[in-house]
Amino acid sequence: MSIVLTPFARTRLFPREPRGNAIQDCTPEDFERRLNAEAPERVLPGYAPFCRLHVHRNWTSTRCLTVPITDDNRHLLRSAYEARSREELPVLVRWFEGVEPPVARWLVAILYSREQLAKEGAPIEADWGIVGCLYTLEPEEIPMAPITMMRNALGVEEGGSGVPLDRDAYLRSVAFWERNANWRP
């Protein structure tokens, strides 16, 4: 099985201007090489048959992706309308500023099959493409954000995957994201 880092994931996980909330102490090439050379601790099913998650122990200083919302930090939440790429429509997002989460224990690589990436107009030569990565304390998936689920349901032409909305998964996601938020340096 071969794995490559997709251009979409490369810009988000390894931005040109280094960010504290991206992958640390690792080049994109080293990350890709490690995921090909090292068997994951766990393989989790993704939200659709073309998606799987490979759970690896964190070998970097990358910090957790999310922070629990408390009465003490709620005032540090920010929001704006943003798009992940030029092609996508902006959506409402929120994040913390001024918090420092713990170093993640796990890196959970999100992989899409070659066939799905071709369908989305992002062909790859490998069997699987890395489309994202979660940085967590537990070797488990963080629920996909509700807006990402909606974007996926809109279809490939709007930056999604074409997977219909799963109401129960959506409600689990809302429950998680009501209590947690991403962070930015």
Image (tube, rainbow, N blue to C red):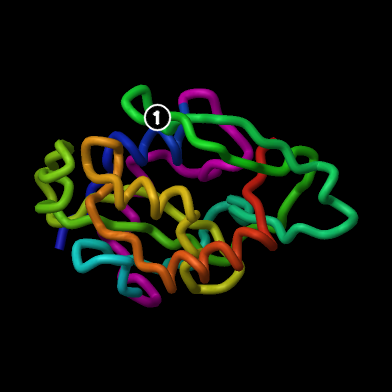
Q: Is residue 20 magenta?
A: yes
Write the residue at 19% across / 55% down. 128
- For the record, the magenta segment spans 16-43
Residue 90 screen position, x and y as percent: 46, 30
Residue in front for this viewpoint, 114 or 121 = 121
Against 172, is 65 above or below? above
- Most extreme residue toward the right is 72
Under tag 1, what secondary structure?
Answer: loop
Q: How many other residues sit within 10 Å of disc 1, few (<14), some (14-19) or many (≥20)? A: few
Query: For this view, does 97 lie left or right of residue 3?
Result: right
Q: Report the amino acid beneath label 1.
A: Leu
State which quarter of the image contains the N terminus: bottom left
State which quarter of the image contains the C terminus: top right
Write the residue at 78% across / 46% down. 99
Against 68, is 131 above or below? above
Residue 8 screen position, x and y as percent: 32, 36
Q: State the image quarter where residue 47 is shown.
A: bottom left
